[in-house]
């Protein structure tokens, strides 16, 4: 994709939001949009809803300390700054649920609202058994709760080839190519809708929606924990975000670093 053209489109972004995306920082290239957003916060240059958007990320971070790799000019790579001071530190995972649902809402407008489009715990976007995108939320806490959040999102849009067979893109699934800027506008609108729902206290409803579209929910599957393979069934999510998996009639809980899908 022509980077200059994309930059011009970004400058013309007008999402129908109250604050998310009303301040947009465009970088043709950066190491990590989350890092850039963090620097803006430290310098008090980021209003709530500020979006850092790039065409090429050279050191993107993912869950479990992994790197997020995306072909330049073909995908969405951005970070959103929010200040969810209404959330206690113990409820951080509720923000993760809201963001994951928003990304799925947005993807469903392109792929259809079917159960082929799922959320893999904690917040990866999957189509069938392949990954479309990922989310990395980094929270800054104070003595009361969450002071600020940086929501990093990477979604494969037009990329056709991947280094791993478990990855795919919107374009691969639909057989189409997409201009990126309009997708950014719709994504920011979806994010703010879910964020405002969370701020209004609709926690229980979002939790139920999350379980409804959770990858492998209530389905027997193989997992690995502490070097041991086992057959388990995901039965729920604790309020702290720990995954509940039933094995031989007994429920166990796992944190992000403690369980791998097989």
Image (tube, grey):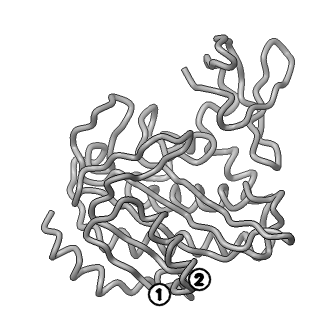
Q: Nearer the viewer, residue 78 or 31?
A: 31
Residue 197: x %, y % from top left:
70, 72
Write the residue at 79% across / 22% down. 246
Residue 14: x %, y % from top left:
39, 87
The dot on residue 48 is 2
Label 1 crowding class (10 Å Cα cut-off): few <14, some 14-19, many 20+?
Answer: some
Secondary structure, mark 2, is loop
Residue 244: x %, y % from top left:
78, 32
Q: Which residue is mark 1?
A: 22
- Residue 154, image quadrant: bottom left
110 displayed left or right of 213: left
Residue 190: x %, y % from top left:
52, 70
Q: Nearer the viewer, mark 2 or mark 1?
A: 2
Classify 219 as above or below 142: above
Q: Nearer the viewer, residue 158 or 106?
A: 158
The dot on residue 223 is none
53 displayed left or right of 247: left
Compare marks 2 and 1 and give the one earlier in the sequence.
Answer: 1
């Amino acid at each position: 994709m022509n980077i200059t053209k994309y930059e011009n489109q970004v400058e013309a972004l007008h999402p129908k939001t109250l604050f998310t995306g009303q301040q947009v920082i465009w970088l043709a290239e950066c190491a990590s949009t989350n890092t850039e957003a963090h620097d803006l916060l430290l310098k008090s240059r980021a209003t709530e809803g500020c979006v850092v958007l790039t065409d090429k990320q050279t050191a993107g971070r993912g869950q479990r300390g992994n790197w997020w790799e995306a072909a330049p000019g073909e995908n969405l790579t951005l970070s959103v700054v929010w200040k969810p001071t209404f959330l206690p530190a113990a409820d951080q995972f509720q923000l993760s649920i809201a963001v994951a649902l928003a990304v799925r809402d947005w993807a469903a407008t392109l792929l259809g609202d079917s159960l082929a489009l799922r959320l893999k715990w904690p917040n990866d976007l999957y189509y069938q058994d392949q990954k479309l995108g990922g989310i990395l939320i980094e929270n800054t806490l104070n003595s009361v709760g969450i002071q600020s959040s940086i929501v990093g999102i990477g979604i494969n849009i037009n990329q056709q080839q991947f280094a791993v067979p478990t990855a795919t893109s919107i374009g691969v699934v639909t057989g189409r190519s997409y201009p990126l800027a309009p997708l950014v506008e719709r994504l920011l609108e979806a994010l703010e809708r879910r964020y405002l729902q969370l701020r209004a206290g609709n926690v229980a409803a979002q939790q139920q929606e999350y379980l409804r579209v959770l990858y492998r929910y209530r389905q027997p599957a193989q997992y690995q924990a502490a070097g041991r393979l086992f057959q388990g069934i995901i039965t729920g999510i604790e309020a702290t975000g720990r995954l509940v998996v039933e094995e031989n009639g007994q429920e166990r809980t796992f944190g992000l670093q403690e369980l791998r899908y097989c």
